[in-house]
Amino acid sequence: MALPKGVHRVIARGREYFYFQANRGTPLAGPRIKLPNDPHSPEFWVEVRKAQGVDKLGPAIKTIDMVCDLYETSPVFKALRESTRQQYRYSMKAVRAAWGELPAEGLQPVHVQTLMDELIESPGKANNVLSFLWALQRWGRKRGHFPHSIAEGVTPYPSKGGHKPWTPGQCAAAEQHLTGMLRRAYFLARYTGQRSSDVVKLGETFIDDGGFRIRQTKTGEQIGDIWCPIEEPLAVEMATWDRAPGPYVRQNHGKVYSKQLLHKHFLEAREAVAELAGATFHGLRATRVVELRQRGATTLQIQDQVGMSPRMIDRYCRFADRKANGKAAVLALAERRRNSGTE
């Protein structure tokens, strides 16, 4: 990669080192300043600008990459929850790819809207990028990095209601067609309602008194402990699995089966099963919630077993509740008609 003026790469004993020295090799050479060893890290570029005599809060900040670097190393960013930092870093990649080397002062809402339009096929990703830009704008404008709003008037794409629960037909198709580790993952998700990041961790050591004791994680962050019973359909399926140390869902030779690999394999399998068109693996979490509600479980009981906020439980169950209420109303009307002799 191209290094800024005054930055020099030195290799000693097989290791790379970086230094800043203005006017190196001339009578006007400045002091030699040690820099971080990773030129791809935000800290590296922050230290470069310090060595160059650029005030990190001053008007010399020129590019979007520089502003992102400073935000990512700021106390404000470090004070965010780990899950939020992870999401912002993911969105930051799209922002850097779009405008990284362009002047920050030139970024306008029209450019942000253009990026949103380019991401229209991935509305969730687009909305996450916009959310990050709002946070970057709030932080950056107070520090003189943006002379104006960069996202004013740009609105997120409307929510489509999140991941849809699977239908009974889709569950039946999955049980018929899915094989191997993907089948294991399906049954674990279907009957526990856990996120893929927790499904790929489940193993014998999680079993406690007829259920799974799970310390849930979301985007790498631990968010709480739950106990989830192992119901008969899952227990019957688990009885066919070979017993080996580590997670139930694993690659050959016991290698870790990541949630990213799980999603990749699910999408590949979905292409071959017509009934699964449009289904998402995360939708099994909603499937479990709706099933428990239909059995009469309260929001608190579902929360204790699945580990989901009451707001999300109500969101997933809203349609199912309305559908059940509608069916009950039809049955009640039919019963009244029979009793009144009108049928």
Image (cartoon, rainbow, N blue to C red):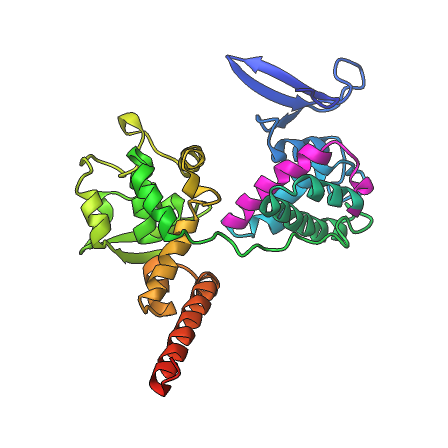
Q: Quadrant of the N terminus?
A: top right
Residue with the most extreme bottom position: 340
On screen, residue 233 versus residue 311, left or right, reads left
Q: Quadrant of the C terminus?
A: bottom left
Relative to the observer, which residue lies in front, 156 or 343?
343
Relative to the observer, which residue lies in front, 203 or 88?
203
Range drawn in magenta: 83-109
Q: Is residue 270 visible?
A: yes
Does residue 55 show up magenta in the picture?
Answer: no
Q: Is residue 237 above or below residue 7?
A: below
Q: Is residue 146 above or below residue 287?
A: above
Dominant secondary structure (helix, strand or loop) of the stretch shown in magenta: helix
Q: Is residue 340 above or below residue 164?
A: below
Q: Residue at x 18, y 47 (%)?
A: 236
Q: Residue 86: horizontal and vertical position, in percent? A: 53, 44
Q: Residue 173: horizontal and vertical position, in percent? A: 35, 43
On screen, residue 240 versus residue 285, left or right, reads left
Q: Residue 81: horizontal and vertical position, in percent? A: 52, 52
Q: Residue at x 73, y 22 (%)?
A: 6
Q: Residue at x 42, y 45 (%)?
A: 281
On screen, residue 75 versus residue 13, left or right, reads right
Relative to the observer, which residue lies in front, 124 or 76?
124
